[in-house]
């Protein structure tokens, strides 16, 4: 087994274990391999091991990398999107996890109209209220969903969050619970938010226990970033 394959197997075992603890099926969990800073060869190796979803956080880096990678990959944007890069982003990516304001949602819709495409997105929520974090504050989520509901080319399929880093993942659990609770409230209000994108290398087990359907893993799969 290659180094990547071994690391992938160990992540999959932890996914299975977290699902077992939570009484969930592993089929509910989608793994995004976050390939930012990684070379096309590393992406190709990962794809050869059966990884389907890859995440990038910068449009420019993705634009250079994607043409050098296998064609059967589904690319996901996981980082903040600047207005002037929206049109390029909607052409490159199959899903945007990090739609972090009404303004960006509207820009994504316009970008989709320009290139003739529909796209699935997740609304990023700033659950911790940290000023350094992107995302809609919890109080504004319902309003944002309401005001974006008439965007014909954008389908908001879930909520995403990136809580502050903590050495001990148990300290992150309350923020995952908060996002899951918010999703439940929005579903009760009639929004069909099936997806929860939460959990990274350091805390994905806890995120799965709290209902994650998409986990975004970089370091554990590819090794530490320089
Ligand atoms: C880098 C990144 C990840 C992956 O982080 P790791 O700790 O390396 O697993 C996940 N989500 C987002 C938004 C990121 O920018």
Image (spheres, rainbow, N blue to C red):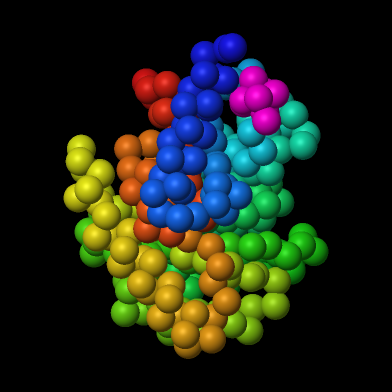
Residue 40 sits above or below residue 198 on the image: above
Is residue 221 rendered to the left or right of residue 152? left
Tally of marks = 0
In the picture, the quarter occupied by the N terminus is: top right
Main SS, magenta residues: helix
Which residue occupies the foreground of this view, 137 or 166? 166
Which residue occupies the foreground of this view, 36 or 112? 36
Residue 193 sits above or below residue 171 on the image: below
- Residue 204's quadrant in the figure? top left
In the picture, the quarter occupied by the C terminus is: top left
* Residue drawn at x 47%, y 85% as measured from the top left: 188
Q: Is residue 60 visible?
A: no
Which residue occupies the foreground of this view, 127 or 183? 183
Residue 8 rendering spot, x and y as whole percentages = 53, 27
Residue 10 rendering spot, x and y as whole percentages = 47, 27
Would residue 48 be counted in the magenta stretch? yes
Residue 129 rendering spot, x and y as whole percentages = 24, 64
- Residue 46's quadrant in the figure? top right
* Residue drawn at x 67%, y 38% as measured from the top left: 52
* Residue drawn at x 48%, y 33% as measured from the top left: 13
Q: Is residue 73 visible?
A: yes
Please provide the residue range marked out in magenta.
43-50
* Residue drawn at x 20%, y 41% as measured from the top left: 168
Residue 209 sits above or below residue 203 on the image: below
Residue 35 rendering spot, x and y as whole percentages = 53, 32
Would residue 140 be counted in the magenta stretch? no
Is residue 164 rendered to the left or right of residue 152? left
């Amino acid at each position: 087994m290659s180094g990547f394959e071994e690391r992938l197997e160990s992540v999959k075992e932890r996914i299975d274990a977290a699902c077992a603890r939570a009484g969930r099926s592993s089929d509910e969990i989608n793994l995004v391999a976050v390939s930012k800073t990684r070379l096309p060869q590393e992406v190709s190796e990962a794809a050869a091991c059966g990884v389907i979803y890859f995440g990038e956080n910068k449009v420019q880096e993705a634009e250079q990398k994607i043409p050098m990678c296998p064609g059967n990959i589904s690319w996901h944007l996981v980082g903040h999107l600047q207005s002037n890069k929206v049109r390029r982003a909607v052409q490159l990516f199959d899903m945007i996890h990090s739609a972090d304001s009404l303004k960006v949602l509207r820009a994504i819709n316009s970008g989709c109209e320009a290139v003739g495409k529909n796209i699935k997105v997740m609304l990023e929520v700033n659950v911790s209220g940290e000023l350094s974090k992107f995302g809609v504050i919890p109080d504004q989520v319902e309003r944002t969903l309401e005001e974006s509901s008439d965007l014909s080319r954008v389908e908001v399929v879930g909520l995403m969050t990136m809580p502050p880093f903590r050495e001990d993942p148990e300290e992150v659990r309350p923020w995952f619970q908060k996002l899951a609770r918010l999703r439940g409230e929005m579903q009760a209000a009639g929004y069909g938010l099936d997806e929860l994108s939460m959990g990274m290398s350091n805390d994905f087990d806890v995120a799965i226990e709290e209902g994650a359907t998409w986990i975004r893993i970089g370091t554990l799969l590819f090794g530490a970033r320089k």
